[in-house]
Amino acid sequence: MGEKVDITVTLKLRPATYYDLVDNANKYRFGTMYFLRSGVTGQFDPQPYYITQDTDKIELNRYFKNNQLFVAMRHFDDTEVTITPIEQQQHA
Protein backbone atom coordinates (compact mmCIF):
# COMPACT_ATOMS: atom_id res chain seq x y z
CA MET A 1 0.00 0.00 0.00
CA GLY A 2 1.20 3.48 -0.87
CA GLU A 3 1.21 6.68 1.07
CA LYS A 4 -2.06 8.40 1.82
CA VAL A 5 -2.43 11.44 -0.43
CA ASP A 6 -4.93 14.19 0.25
CA ILE A 7 -6.27 15.88 -2.86
CA THR A 8 -8.46 18.96 -3.02
CA VAL A 9 -10.71 19.37 -6.03
CA THR A 10 -12.28 22.73 -6.81
CA LEU A 11 -15.27 23.01 -9.12
CA LYS A 12 -16.67 26.19 -10.58
CA LEU A 13 -20.45 26.03 -10.47
CA ARG A 14 -23.09 27.85 -12.47
CA PRO A 15 -26.89 27.89 -12.26
CA ALA A 16 -28.39 24.89 -14.05
CA THR A 17 -30.28 25.49 -17.26
CA TYR A 18 -33.29 23.50 -18.40
CA TYR A 19 -31.17 21.63 -20.95
CA ASP A 20 -28.59 20.70 -18.31
CA LEU A 21 -31.35 18.56 -16.80
CA VAL A 22 -33.25 17.28 -19.84
CA ASP A 23 -32.38 16.47 -23.45
CA ASN A 24 -34.04 17.74 -26.63
CA ALA A 25 -36.73 15.06 -26.27
CA ASN A 26 -37.53 16.39 -22.74
CA LYS A 27 -36.18 13.21 -21.11
CA TYR A 28 -34.14 13.57 -17.94
CA ARG A 29 -30.37 13.34 -18.39
CA PHE A 30 -29.65 10.44 -16.05
CA GLY A 31 -26.18 10.68 -14.53
CA THR A 32 -26.07 14.49 -14.52
CA MET A 33 -24.28 15.72 -11.41
CA TYR A 34 -25.73 18.76 -9.65
CA PHE A 35 -25.33 20.66 -6.40
CA LEU A 36 -27.98 22.26 -4.21
CA ARG A 37 -27.90 25.72 -2.66
CA SER A 38 -30.05 26.32 0.39
CA GLY A 39 -32.98 28.64 -0.23
CA VAL A 40 -32.73 29.73 3.42
CA THR A 41 -29.00 30.22 4.09
CA GLY A 42 -27.62 30.43 0.55
CA GLN A 43 -24.98 27.86 1.51
CA PHE A 44 -24.12 24.99 -0.82
CA ASP A 45 -24.50 21.37 0.19
CA PRO A 46 -21.01 19.96 -0.58
CA GLN A 47 -22.50 16.60 -1.53
CA PRO A 48 -22.95 16.07 -5.27
CA TYR A 49 -26.32 14.69 -6.38
CA TYR A 50 -27.06 12.78 -9.58
CA ILE A 51 -30.20 12.54 -11.68
CA THR A 52 -31.37 8.92 -11.63
CA GLN A 53 -34.60 7.08 -12.28
CA ASP A 54 -35.25 7.39 -8.54
CA THR A 55 -34.83 11.18 -8.43
CA ASP A 56 -37.95 12.93 -7.16
CA LYS A 57 -38.82 14.93 -10.29
CA ILE A 58 -41.24 17.21 -8.41
CA GLU A 59 -38.50 18.14 -5.91
CA LEU A 60 -35.98 18.62 -8.73
CA ASN A 61 -38.39 20.94 -10.54
CA ARG A 62 -38.99 22.91 -7.33
CA TYR A 63 -35.24 23.34 -6.79
CA PHE A 64 -34.86 24.45 -10.41
CA LYS A 65 -37.68 27.02 -10.19
CA ASN A 66 -36.18 28.38 -6.95
CA ASN A 67 -32.72 28.76 -8.56
CA GLN A 68 -31.19 26.25 -6.15
CA LEU A 69 -29.70 23.85 -8.75
CA PHE A 70 -26.10 24.31 -9.87
CA VAL A 71 -23.93 22.29 -12.24
CA ALA A 72 -20.20 22.25 -12.87
CA MET A 73 -18.97 24.75 -15.44
CA ARG A 74 -17.55 23.24 -18.58
CA HIS A 75 -14.43 24.55 -20.30
CA PHE A 76 -16.49 26.30 -23.00
CA ASP A 77 -19.00 27.95 -20.64
CA ASP A 78 -16.73 31.00 -20.28
CA THR A 79 -16.17 31.26 -24.03
CA GLU A 80 -18.04 33.84 -26.06
CA VAL A 81 -18.44 32.92 -29.72
CA THR A 82 -19.06 35.54 -32.39
CA ILE A 83 -20.10 34.41 -35.86
CA THR A 84 -19.42 36.77 -38.73
CA PRO A 85 -21.27 36.10 -42.00
CA ILE A 86 -19.03 35.23 -44.96
CA GLU A 87 -20.07 38.38 -46.86
CA GLN A 88 -18.76 40.59 -44.05
CA GLN A 89 -15.50 38.62 -43.84
CA GLN A 90 -14.81 39.16 -47.56
CA HIS A 91 -15.31 42.94 -47.28
CA ALA A 92 -13.21 43.34 -44.15
Image (cartoon, rainbow, N blue to C red):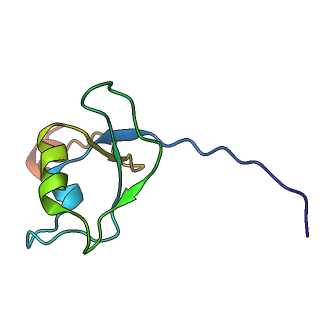
* Residue situated in front as seen by the camera: 10 or 51: 51
User: Closest to the observer: 85 or 23?
Assistant: 23
Q: Is residue 70 depicted above or below 21 in this figure? A: above
Name the residue nearer the viewer: 45 or 64: 45
**Residue 1 image point, x, y percent:** 91, 70
Is residue 42 visible to us here? yes
Drawn side of residue 17 relative to residue 51, left or right: left
Residue depicted at 21% across the width and 41% down the height: 82
- Coordinates of residue 49 in the picture (x, y in percent): 38, 56
Give percent across and percent down for residue 75: 42, 49
Residue at left 26%, top 72%?
54
1 versus 70 height, above or below: below
What residue is rendered at 38% in x and 29% in y?
43
The C terminus lies in which quarter of the figure? top left
Task: Tally the numbered discs.
Answer: 0
Q: Quadrant of residue 77?
A: top left
Question: Is any atom of residue 84 visible in this view?
Answer: no
- Percent from the top left, x then y, of residue 72? 39, 48
| Residue 14, quarter of picture | top left
